[in-house]
Image: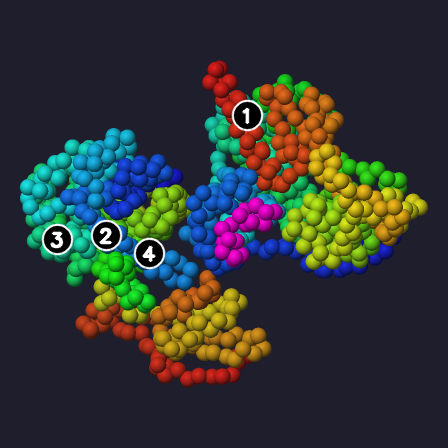
Amino acid sequence: MPRPDGGESVLSPEALEANFADIAPPLTPDAALVESSKCLFCYDAPCTIACPTHIDVPAFIKKIMTGNLTGSARVILDANPMGHSCARACPVEVLCEGACVLNERDEEPIKIALLQRYATDHVLSHDLKLFSPGVDNGRKVAIIGAGPAGLSCAQDLRRWGYAVTMFDAHPNPGGLNTYAIAEYKMRPPTALAEAKKILELGVELHCNVTIGRDIPFADLERDFDAIFIGIGLGATRDLGIPGEDLGGVQDALSFIEHLKTHSYPDTRVGNDVIVVGAGNTAIDAATQAKRLGAQRVTIVYRRGEEEMPAYPYEYELAKRDGCEFRFFTVPKRVLGNGAITGLECVRAELGAPDARGRRQPVEIEGSEHVIRCDMLLKATGQLPRAEFAREAGLTVEGSKIVSSKPNVFVGGDAASGGAEIVNAAAEGKAAAARIHALLSSALAVA
Amino acid sequence: MADLSVNFAGIRSPNPFWLASGPPTNTYGQCAKAFDVGWGGAVWKTVGEPIINVFSRYGSIDLGINRMIGFNNIELISDRPIEDNLREIAELKRNYPNNAVIVSLMVESKREAWHDIVKRTEDTGADGIELNFGCPHGMSERGMGAAVGQVPEYTCNIVGWVKEVSKIPVIVKLTPNVTDITYIARAAVEGGADALSLINTINSIVGVDLNTFTPLPDVGGQSSHGGYCGPAVKPIALNLLSATASDPAVKIPISGIGGISTWRDAAEFIALGSTTLQVCTAVMHYGFRIVEDLTDGLSTWMDQSGIASIEELRGRALPKVTKWENLDLNYHIVASIDQSKCIKCELCWTACEDGAHQAIRRYPRVNGGPVVEIIEEACVGCNLCAQVCPVQGCISMQRVPNDHPPVTWKQFTAGEGALAPRSEHFHTATFSSAPKQG
């Protein structure tokens, strides 16, 4: 592993492979039978309500128990085209599993994610074709961004007979599923296999194409009956402090993307890594830096443990991986001469709530200190793709792109400002339904 | 997509899944809801002179975390006025013309009473009639239900009375509480029945409360025997179904009943001769929605198995049911343990050692080596070890080829054919405590 200092890898390829092994290995057939038999088959089930795509969880679990794996996968993927990736990357402890009634009986909840993986893996291992395209209705829809939102939108539109053309700036489809999910949760081949199942419905996909740069948005408006935008978010927010442009400062997402598109030894990691921010991306960056061989990983966050956006599961994961947390710590200056050597910070405490009711950190005078580092990863949230919005004639409200054009729809992180895969899937499907409502009424008139 | 539609003695149904006569088919609202979620038909809860029920009516048995694997009831037939039932049945058939609406009937054993109720039932537009000759509790004390269905002559007579006036198919529902169900089945055929349904519930006492010594269900400190049903009764139903369906004197369609909870159960009932399937306990446990996996699971499995219709599946297993005397004595199998899957619980050993044929060798838990090993020469191929094994696919039964052609007990005792040599180790296995090397 080439380190920033050009040194040799501290971890063997075998050790790296082990560090990135499946964090939640699949259930064996026996375990799946035991687990599915435990499901009570609740009516109006809390797990289903908790899922943004409202998968009929008890139904798919009972089908596993009765040996109807194909039917089980159909229930999952009909409701959530991203069922493969959600089984691996959903924050289930705050969604379906957190809602399981067994929690009320002081028991472990049903392992819904692993059961979902068990059923959906059956589709990939048997190359099942669960859905078929609808009869061609003569209407064309363009989808910009082949991530979770776009793919979910595409699946329903194809099933209803729309011609779907997708554009993606990356060489491969899948969006963040391919390029950003923590490697120990899901690897790119699974994301690509999931995308392929949808593309096989007859979607025309153009990769390495950036709308606005390679093709004007207006061309799409001219050539398609409706457009769905699922382009995600743009650049990571700057820290806004001196020294940010020093070598060794990188945004967390590009660090993860590099890891996911190269062999492990080919991804550069420092010995002393600081991650700024305490959201889920920060955790992903921190744990993966540690697993790549960083000696010390420090997460720097200007608020406290209570305020940090990362899910409890992710927080625990980072702690288990040996990442250190510096709460109430505000970065002031990146130190170094060409290459980064440290981060100067001040300590803070929470002040009075601001206009939105969020207590702002107030710096403590005289608390300046330096945290040594040779790599700094920024996980301070992403900005909306404002330039694209301008080109497309859409507006940006806060971190969200909003469309007022009747046949242009926005979903996924571009519309939400950043959420989970399952939210993107739900929004993609909802957009497909709105497009269908819009265009099928037009069809009826024609 | 497999075709699940059926024609049962002239009654058409979009799929073979019917609600059995019972609490789930007591009202219009229940049946309409059931049809809305996919049930093919419903047999309306038995109509007759309204009865008065006791309050405590159901009992059940659990096995570990599995609740209600067996279920019993002492509920009687409909407690609603005949007119109310018939009015709602007419409305149901009017609003659901494509679903099968069957009316279960039970009246006193008088020709006029049966003529009257049959005619009134036909006026509803219902597709068929099911004669409840099987209810084993309460009604039988009044000379109805199983009291009729346990006597071939009564069964034949009453079916005859019904057929004198009935213009729609008549299904006779049989009780399992008899020595040989085929006698009753033949009597029903002789009386003119168009179809049979079986089994009704089995006489049972489901348990005793050890604090009060009152059997269950407890009705004010007393109890009474009730009708047993649910998943636990399926094997009994399958046997009686097979006996009836393979009886050359019974050539009429059969509606299978008894513990059907999953699409697999359904497929098994059809393979043993059922055309339609009736479900009650599973609905009482989980609601009408279970029909979704019943139909989806059955049709997905049929597609995967290349079976296009229910008719193509029906009776497929029947030719394989025979008398013991026709079984091949030279068919030799032994158990085989996949050591890579063994989790070393030793359940197979203790089952074989204490409960069967002492054909498994056990080793101390040392060196991480195997702890159990089949003694092939002692193994009688009984299947017990594979059945107790908690790991799927760990113990399988393997064919041991021999040069001898098949020979049955019937042939063998008639001096035909030869028995393949059998191991002298049977029941005399010796035991080793030394771990096997390699």
Residue type at mark 1 is: Ile
Q: Main secondary structure of the magenta part?
A: helix
Tell me the chain of label 2: B
Count of numbered circles on the image = 4
Where residue A55 sits: x, y (%)? Answer: 50, 42
Residue type at mark 3 is: Arg
Tell me the chain of label 3: B
Q: Is residue A368 left or right of residue B124?
A: right
Picture quadrant of residue B330: bottom left
> Which mark, by number, is residue B231?
4
Counting other residues with Cα less than 10 Å from the Cα at mark 1, is it few (<14), some (14-19), or many (20 or more)? many
Q: Residue at x 52, y 21 (%)?
A: A439
Give the alpha-carbon distance from disc 1 to disc 2, as whole Å.
57 Å
Q: Secondary structure at mark 1?
A: helix
Q: Secondary structure at mark 3?
A: helix
Give the alpha-carbon distance from disc 2 to disc 3, as whole Å.
16 Å
Viewer-nearest residue: B328 or A334: A334
First of labels 4, 2 by sequence position:
2
- Circle 2 residue: B54
| For the residues bearing labels 1 and 2, Cβ distance under 8 angstroms | no
Which region of the structure is painted magenta? A91-108
Viewer-nearest residue: B393 or A318: A318
- Circle 1 residue: A435
| For the residues bearing labels 4 and 3, Cβ distance under 8 angstroms | no
Q: Is residue A26 left or right of residue A287?
A: left
